[in-house]
Image (cartoon, grey):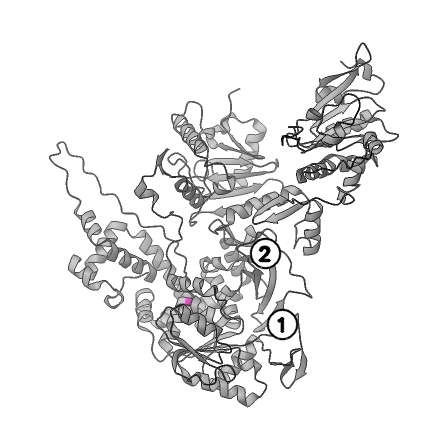
């Protein structure tokens, strides 16, 4: 029978559809059933298969560039469960970081001419250490960055060393540059100063880019102002208590941060709000403390509470503070964060803010690649023709790249007034339209069409949310918005009509469910069918427009959803939940610290904080809510696989409570360091549990020689305790659970105790020394692991040994007789070696290695005949 080309990874087997002819009839029938259930056809829609460890599950995979690329990228997958008759579809067509395939030669036939080149490439990768850390190789972006980190680049099927000039170039793992990136840079610097929420919101939206003056009305000790000035920004402040002598000044931006909520007198509150508004030339930022449903605090005083510190606090709901500000100022207050609202005096700035707020910020377009010039084959080539287009592009590369980026950002041809390099481009190309035609000829129209579609979706979301907010119509539209409407809709009435129709569809449960399913198929969140879609906030801007409007309506009531980490779209109940975690990006198990439930039908918000009274729960299976483009996605997957492999927890639903989870990990001598599960390095107490039924003391102080000599016999290496625990969990606990309590006759043996034991022992081989070292610092037993000898009273030890063989992953098992203790070990190799100790001619026991089949066939009373 011919060898089937296949690749085995863990418990999964991959093969190419070309190998289907070699499969047995039963497996072929499973594949055919999966094709029918998924509604796809081999070669046409998929070219690889993956068989999971379950007979009922297999995946149909589409690698379109399998025949050409050294490390082809996955474009589509259908996960089929033949028992449940279910299909889960996922597309990576839009992904900037798709999964990739390694060791392609394993899937090629022996006589395939590409097999040799693929095998040579794999060997090169192994030689330079590219496969050393499996967590970094599964996705395209991390893989290419790793190759460059090792000092190479990929050229076809060859690793080419980087020259000095190339190696000095930064790694090409950066995100595509997005609008507002300079503001993000400022935010990074600002965060180091611990700025308040309203100041951080200004940074997030690009207002702290150095073009605006800021005045902090009620600046307190002046921490925000000091930090802004140290960042090179124009800022000043006044406070009636801490800075009464500072001048009160007009400014582009005025911050009224957590001021009105500490004023117990209502009239004084009104005065503070109106005075701050009078100083704001473009924007007023108002922020207050919000009420916490989980933590009502303080004694009632007027319309607020008197805190334990003797200070006044007026806790608002988001709806209350919005209504209060709008009633006093007769201007719309726009929530941008919990308890933070913007009030614009400059309506052009307001329109630009709102349009950009609903823009798809992720650049889903690849880097533009010039279309290769058509090669004209001539019978006789006199001389090589100049590529004048390439020369011109090289001469004007930077202004052309900026123009192209602007075109894609706008989704339409830029107006002259929007082009910063107009003079240079006009000199080089004669006019702006000619420069645009040059770019179109070089890069094609696909990217332009995608950008236009994305921009139309952005504008539909913007206008729909304008209608939802019942926002007063502007007396005039900002010029850029006017150009957008003309280019994409023709007129304002058409834009409004299309957007209003889309807005009304958020009440259509079936439409919301379809949009959630579409999002999940594109890797945007975790779908609970008929219930909810839950995803990271960074993915919201990639959602279908209907869901962006759904979330946007919630943001109208709450503020910017980006202040949270996860968004949960409730499909049928008209609710959106926002969850904020403690260091979501930096921890594999972040803990929930804040949850907000926004009820769109009631136009109301419930706010819950977690802390002392309500223990912050862990977020398990975090990878469900992010995708392959998230920076820590590969290591997150690896962590979750390691946690699942422990077999300690039921992670269905919300998983175990934090206290039980942490205690269970500690009891099994595991801890979390970064994104790794590692063994603790502390030494446990002797009476601490070692498995479910025993203690460490029982495994250490159980031999006759130890009892007679009184030696402490304590392990010195933390790894020895780990090995004893693993032996208990993997072998002894199952035995005790099945047969009842055991009697230990020989357990851990330190080098000191071994020197006191009379008779024939073999510390270098028997694994009783666990991971201990000798005087020279070398392992006593290179097999590692741990071993014990034990007896089960009133049981056939042959039956016990046979049960261990059939039911546990042991390393070595020594059988001495039906009524004698057995020796069993558990170690990293799990060799499953069975040794029957048989009496020789002189009565001396002789070890004989026997097969599993032979040992399982033994019967009591016939042991002597075994040979």
Q: Is residue 729 above or below residue 113?
A: below
Name the side, left or right, on which 276 lies relative to 828.
left
Report the residue marked by disc 2. 590
Q: Is residue 553 above or below residue 708?
A: below
The vertical placement of 798 against 367, above or below, is: above
For the C terminus, the image quarter is top right
Looking at the image, is mark 1 or mark 2 earlier in the sequence? 1
- Give the crowd class for mark 2: few <14, some 14-19, many >=20 residues within 10 Å: some
- Magenta stretch, overall SS: loop
Q: Is residue 158 visible?
A: yes
Residue at the spot of label 1: 292
- Residue 570 seen in the figure: no
Res. 839 mark:
none
In reply to whether residue 505 is colored magenta, the answer given is: no
Secondary-structure class at tag 2: loop
Relative image position of residue 416 (x, y in whole percent):
23, 66
Q: Residue furthest front?
A: 775
Q: Tag 1, which secondary structure?
A: loop
Decide: few, some or many residues near mark 1? Use Cα within 10 Å; few <14, some 14-19, many ≥20: some
Most distant residue in the left direction = 382
Q: Position of residue 636 (x, y in %)?
A: 55, 48
């Amino acid at each position: 029978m011919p060898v089937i080309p296949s690749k085995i990874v863990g418990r999964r087997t991959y093969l190419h559809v070309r190998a289907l002819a070699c499969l047995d009839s039963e497996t072929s029938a499973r594949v055919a059933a999966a094709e029918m259930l998924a509604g796809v056809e081999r070669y046409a829609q998929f070219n690889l298969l993956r068989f999971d460890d379950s007979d009922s599950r297999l995946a149909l995979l589409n690698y379109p560039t399998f025949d050409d690329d050294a490390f082809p990228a996955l474009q589509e997958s259908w996960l089929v469960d033949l028992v449940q008759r279910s299909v889960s579809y996922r597309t990576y067509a839009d992904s900037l970081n798709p999964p990739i395939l390694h060791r392609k030669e394993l899937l090629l036939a022996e006589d395939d001419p590409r097999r040799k080149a693929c095998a040579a490439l794999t060997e090169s990768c192994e030689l330079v250490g590219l496969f050393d850390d499996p967590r970094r190789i599964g996705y395209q972006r991390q893989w290419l960055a790793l190759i460059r980190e090792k000092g190479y680049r990929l050229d076809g099927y060859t690793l080419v060393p980087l020259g000095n000039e190339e190696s000095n170039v930064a790694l090409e793992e950066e995100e595509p540059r997005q609008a507002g990136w300079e503001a993000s840079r400022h935010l990074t610097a600002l965060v180091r100063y611990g700025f308040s929420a309203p100041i951080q919101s200004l940074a997030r939206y690009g207002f702290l880019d150095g073009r605006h003056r800021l005045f902090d009305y009620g600046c307190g000790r002046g921490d925000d102002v000091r930090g802004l000035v140290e960042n090179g920004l124009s800022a000043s402040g006044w406070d009636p208590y801490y800075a009464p002598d500072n001048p009160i000044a007009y400014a582009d931006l005025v911050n009224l941060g957590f001021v009105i909520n500490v004023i117990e007198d209502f009239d004084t509150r009104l005065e503070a709000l109106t005075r701050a508004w009078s100083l704001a030339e473009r924007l007023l930022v108002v922020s207050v403390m919000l009420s916490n449903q989980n933590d009502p605090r303080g004694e009632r005083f007027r319309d607020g509470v008197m805190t334990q510190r003797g200070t006044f606090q007026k806790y608002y709901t988001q709806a209350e503070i919005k209504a209060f500000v709008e009633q006093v100022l007769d201007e719309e207050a726009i929530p941008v964060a919990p308890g933070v609202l913007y009030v614009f005096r400059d309506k052009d700035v307001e329109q630009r803010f709102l349009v950009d707020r609903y823009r798809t910020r992720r650049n889903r377009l690849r880097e533009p690649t010039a279309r290769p010039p058509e090669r004209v084959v001539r019978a006789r080539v006199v001389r090589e023709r100049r590529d004048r287009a390439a020369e011109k592009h090289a001469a004007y590369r930077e202004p052309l790249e900026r123009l192209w980026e602007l075109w894609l950002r706008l989704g339409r041809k830029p107006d002259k007034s929007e082009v910063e390099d107009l003079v240079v481009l006009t000199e080089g190309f004669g006019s702006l339209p000619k420069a645009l035609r040059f770019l179109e000829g070089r890069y094609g129209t696909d990217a332009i069409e995608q950008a236009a579609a994305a921009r139309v979706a952005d504008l539909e979301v913007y206008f729909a949310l304008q209608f939802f907010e019942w926002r007063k119509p502007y007396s005039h539209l900002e010029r850029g918005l006017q150009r957008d409407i003309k280019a994409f809709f023709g007129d304002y009435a058409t834009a409004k009509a299309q957007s209003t129709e889309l807005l009304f569809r958020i009440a259509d449960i079936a439409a919301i469910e379809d949009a959630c399913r579409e999002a999940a198929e594109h890797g945007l969140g975790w779908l609970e069918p008929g219930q909810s879609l839950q995803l990271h906030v960074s993915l919201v801007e990639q959602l279908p427009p209907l869901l962006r409007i759904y979330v946007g309506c919630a943001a109208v009531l709450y503020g910017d959803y980006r202040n949270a980490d996860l968004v949960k779209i409730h499909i049928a109940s008209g609710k959106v939940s926002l969850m904020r975690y403690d260091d979501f990006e930096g921890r594999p198990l972040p803990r929930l610290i804040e949850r907000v439930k926004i009820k769109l039908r009631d136009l109301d918000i419930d706010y819950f904080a977690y802390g002392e009274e309500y223990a912050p729960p862990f977020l398990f299976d975090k990878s469900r809510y992010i995708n392959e483009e998230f920076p820590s996605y590969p290591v997150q997957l690896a962590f979750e696989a390691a946690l699942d492999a422990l077999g300690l927890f039921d992670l269905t639903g919300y998983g175990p409570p934090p206290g039980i989870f942490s205690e269970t990990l500690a009891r099994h001598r595991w801890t979390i360091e970064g994104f790794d599960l590692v063994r603790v390095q502390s030494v446990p107490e002797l009476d601490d549990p070692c498995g479910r039924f025993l203690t460490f003391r029982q495994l250490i102080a159980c031999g006759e020689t130890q009892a007679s000599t009184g030696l402490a016999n304590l392990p010195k290496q933390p790894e020895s305790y780990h090995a004893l625990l693993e032996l208990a969990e993997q072998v002894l606990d199952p035995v005790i659970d099945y047969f009842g309590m055991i009697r230990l006759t020989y357990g851990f043996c330190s080098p000191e105790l071994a020197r006191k034991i009379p008779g024939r022992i073999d510390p270098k081989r028997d694994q009783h020394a666990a991971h201990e070292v000798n005087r020279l610092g070398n392992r006593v037993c290179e097999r590692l692991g741990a071993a014990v000898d034990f007896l089960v009273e009133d049981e056939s030890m042959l039956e016990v040994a046979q049960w261990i063989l059939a039911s546990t992953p042991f390393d070595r098992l020594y059988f001495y007789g039906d009524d004698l203790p057995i020796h069993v070990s558990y170690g990293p190799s799990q060799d499953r070696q069975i040794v029957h100790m048989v009496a020789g001619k002189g009565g001396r026991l002789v070890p004989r290695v026997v097969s599993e089949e032979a040992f399982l066939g033994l019967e009591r009373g016939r042991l002597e005949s075994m040979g």
